[in-house]
Amino acid sequence: MTRPLEIAACRRLCSWDATGEHLDGQPLFACGGCGSEWAPTEQWTPVDWTGEVPEPVQAARRGRGRG
């Protein structure tokens, strides 16, 4: 990775969405609650404050073959 992902303490206000940016060719997602970032190459999956995985995140995971 050209730079590390931003990681901040969870504030339980999670709202993950695509940023429109790419990092190393992967779509970049960010949490509107704490500013943490996620890319589909990560082994974990972001979850919104509702307990659901947002559809854009699901689509990105499907794109890497991990549904």
Image (spheres, rainbow, N blue to C red):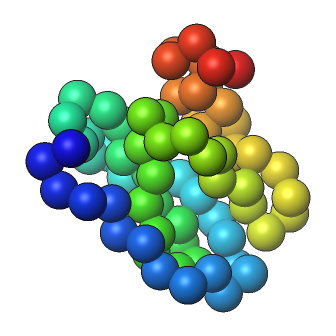
Q: Quadrant of the N terminus?
A: top left
Task: State the residue at coordinates (59%, 58%).
Answer: 16
Q: Position of residue 37 (x, y in %)?
A: 42, 60
- Which of the two residues, 20 or 3, is positioned nearer the viewer here? 3
Report the number of discs. 0
**Which residue is at the far top?**
65
Q: Residue at x 56, y 40 (%)?
A: 43
Q: Which residue is found at the position 47% from the left and 80% from the top?
A: 8
Q: Position of residue 65 (x, y in %)?
A: 58, 12
Q: Residue at x 64, y 20 (%)?
A: 66
Q: Compared with residue 10, is residue 24 higher up or lower down, i.e. above or below? A: above
Q: Is residue 19 left or right of residue 57?
A: left
Viewer-closest of 43 and 20: 43
- 36 vs 13, left or right, is left
Q: Quadrant of residue 25?
A: top left
x and y percentages locating residue 27 in the rendered image:
36, 37
- Residue extending farthest to the front is 43
Left or right for 52, reference 41? right
Q: Quadrant of the C terminus?
A: top right
Position of 11 relative to 54 (above/below): below
Question: Compared to 17, does 59 lie above or below?
Answer: above
Say which of 3 and 31 sits in front: 3
Toward the right, the furthest residue is: 51
Q: Residue 34, how many percent across, how many down?
A: 52, 80
